[in-house]
């Protein structure tokens, strides 16, 4: 299956759970979401731990989707009924098998579901280089009874058996990586000040610098393990004396090779703050390609209060030791 069909099948996955309402191309052989009327739009959360899934309605060549009941990793999806009653259908990604009779393939379905006399083999989703495979989608239905029980539970039925499973490339995960990047807890850049003892003098350089080191995070998008890297891009120093904050791409260096410094003109107590903007990129585990993430993240660091003194010359009668 090519990358395009993988993108089409994202209608099932957590892309809608993360991005809210969107339109995707209809996937031939898998028209999930058309089974339910489109509900009245409701606010959706971008917080992944709770279920927030996908229902929708065909419109032209696309499907309008709204997040309602999809698991955080996108592997399980229960569209609610339009009247708000409990779901009566579930879609799930899971491994599939092929049943053989005398070395001839007969059926494709759930692992362990081959009949007597049949031999079972793994159904492998073949993808191109730099793509990753998603397990095929299965569907199960049931009836919700008035007493809270369920009945008529069906077997798991393989969807789109002629071409099961999907292949995804990094471009398919880019919107999810962007949303995940905004949720990351990036450690704010450290602030180092010289002189280092909590005080400085007017009319001399007060040196500031930070670390340019990137930070890495591991997570999963649609069940696919990825690495996200956040790298400092710009540094904005506010020296808390009424002057315009200074923005630079230089993290600065320590004395005597310092490149970022500020001169205070009056005695005061100041709190230096550093705002760092971070660029992001992500990599699918097992591949060599890094893909840029659109947008930036910002962290802010406040240093301990800094006392600014003015050095004054004084005449003394005794020699100084």
Image (cartoon, helix red, strand yellow):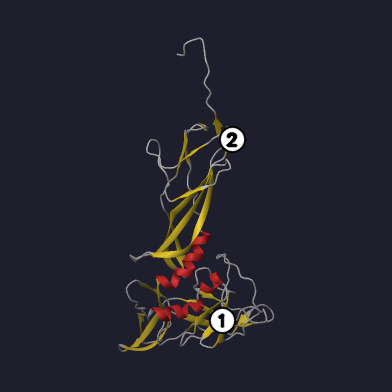
- Whether residue 245 is visible to the viewer of this picture, yes or no, is yes
**Element under disc 1:** strand
Q: Which residue is mark 2?
A: 269
Residue 294 drawn above or below residue 250: below
Residue 137 drawn above or below residue 302: below
Residue 71: image location, x then y, percent: 54, 70
Using a 10 Å C-alpha cutoff, classify the residue at mark 1 as few (fewer than 14 neighbours), some (14 to 19) or many (20 or more). Answer: many
Among numbered discs 2 and 1, the one appearing first in the sequence: 1
**Residue extending furthest right?**
146
- Whether residue 32 is visible to the viewer of this picture, yes or no, is no
Q: Toward the viewer: 6 or 249?
A: 249
The answer to which image quadrant residue 267 occupies is top right
Residue 176: image location, x then y, percent: 48, 68
Quadrant into which the N terminus falls: bottom left
Residue 266: image location, x then y, percent: 57, 33
Q: Which residue is mark 1?
A: 64
Residue 211: image location, x then y, percent: 43, 46
**Residue extending furthest top?**
318
Quadrant into which the C terminus falls: top left
Using a 10 Å C-alpha cutoff, classify the residue at mark 2 as few (fewer than 14 neighbours), some (14 to 19) or many (20 or more). Answer: some
Is residue 97 toward the left or the right of residue 41 in the image?
left
Q: Are marks 2 and 1 in contact (CB under 8 Å)?
A: no
Q: Select label 2 or label 1 by which is in front.
A: 2
Q: Toward the viewer: 135 or 294?
A: 294
Residue 295 drawn above or below residue 189: below
């Amino acid at each position: 299956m090519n990358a395009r069909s993988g993108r089409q099948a994202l209608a099932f996955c957590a892309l809608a759970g993360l991005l809210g309402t969107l339109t995707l191309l209809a996937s031939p052989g898998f028209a999930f979401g058309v089974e339910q009327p489109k509900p009245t739009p409701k606010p959706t959360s971008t917080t992944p731990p709770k279920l927030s899934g996908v229902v929708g309605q065909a419109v032209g060549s696309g499907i309008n989707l709204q997040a309602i009941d999809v698991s955080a990793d996108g592997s399980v999806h229960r569209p609610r009924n339009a009247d708000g009653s409990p779901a009566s259908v579930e879609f799930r990604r899971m491994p599939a098998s092929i049943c053989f009779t005398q070395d001839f393939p007969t059926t494709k379905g759930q692992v362990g579901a081959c009949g007597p006399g049949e031999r079972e083999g793994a159904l492998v989703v073949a993808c191109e280089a730099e793509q990753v495979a998603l397990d095929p989608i299965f569907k199960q239905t049931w009836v919700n009874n008035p007493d809270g029980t369920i009945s008529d539970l069906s077997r798991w039925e393989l969807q789109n058996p002629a071409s099961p499973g999907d292949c995804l490339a990094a471009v398919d995960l880019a919107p999810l990586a962007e949303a995940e990047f905004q949720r990351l807890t990036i450690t704010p850049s450290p602030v180092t000040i010289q002189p280092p003892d909590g005080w400085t003098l007017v009319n001399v350089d007060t040196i500031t610098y930070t670390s340019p080191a990137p930070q890495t995070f591991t997570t999963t998008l649609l069940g696919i393990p990825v690495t996200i890297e956040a790298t400092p891009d710009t540094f904005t120093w506010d020296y808390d004396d009424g002057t315009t904050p200074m923005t630079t791409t230089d993290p600065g260096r320590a004395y005597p090779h310092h490149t970022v410094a500020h001169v205070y003109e009056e005695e005061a107590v100041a709190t230096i703050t550093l705002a760092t903007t971070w660029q992001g990129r992500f990599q699918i585990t097992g591949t060599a390609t890094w893909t840029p993430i659109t947008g930036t993240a910002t962290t802010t660091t406040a240093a301990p209060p800094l006392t600014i003194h003015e050095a004054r010359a004084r005449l003394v009668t005794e020699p100084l030791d």
